[in-house]
Image (tube, grey):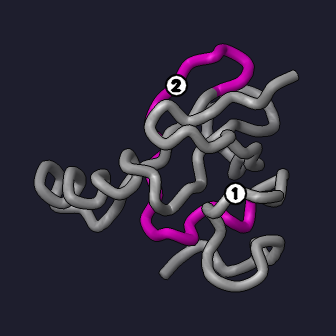
């Protein structure tokens, strides 16, 4: 089965484990963790201008419904520690070892 891709940057979506008590169904969701994705990049400005919040969002799909929606993040490293599929050849990981997803979840 072909993995879905982000419509904003074309990178494959990555499975991530859901935090407890999110209200979402299933054990995981799919999201774009490409830090250079235009959707993620412009999200910082949009959230600041419209909500006075230092946050952005990543493209997300609920695999149980196929519904896409923004995934709010408070930093570039938010939720990286919950990635279930380490990147293989895509450049979305922070500097350093792309398999080291324990970079911390807040800045």
Could you classify mark 2 by the number of other residues whose Cα lies within 10 Å: few (under 14), some (14-19), or many (20 or more)? few
Identity of the residue furthest to the left in this view: 49
Residue at image position (67%, 65%) is: 80
User: Where 102 falls versus 24 (above or below)?
Assistant: below
Q: Name the residue under label 1.
A: 90
The number of discs equals: 2
Disc nearest the viewer among 1 and 2: 1
Q: Mark 2 points at which residue?
A: 68
Task: Please give left or right for residue 66 compared with residue 106 in the image.
Answer: right
Task: Please give left or right for residue 80 compared with residue 45 in the image.
Answer: right
Between the residue at mark 1 and the residue at mark 2, the CA separation in whole angstroms equals 21 Å
User: Where 106 falls versus 5 (above or below)?
Assistant: below
Instruction: Tell me the element at label 2.
Output: strand
Q: Give the range drawn in magenta.
A: 62-82
Task: Please give left or right for residue 86 compared with residue 8 in the image.
Answer: right
The foreground one among 100 and 20 is 100
Task: Please give left or right for residue 14 compared with residue 94 in the image.
Answer: right
The foreground one among 10 and 16 is 10
């Amino acid at each position: 089965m072909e993995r879905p891709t982000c419509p904003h940057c074309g990178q494959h979506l990555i499975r991530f484990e859901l935090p407890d008590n999110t209200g979402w169904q299933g054990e995981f969701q799919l999201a774009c963790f490409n830090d250079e994705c235009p959707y993620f990049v412009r999200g910082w400005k949009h959230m600041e201008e419209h909500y006075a919040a230092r946050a952005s969002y990543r493209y997300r799909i609920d695999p149980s419904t196929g519904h896409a929606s923004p995934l709010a993040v408070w930093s570039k490293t938010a939720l990286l520690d919950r990635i279930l599929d380490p990147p293989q050849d895509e450049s979305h990981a922070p500097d350093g070892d792309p398999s080291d997803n324990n970079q911390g979840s807040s800045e």
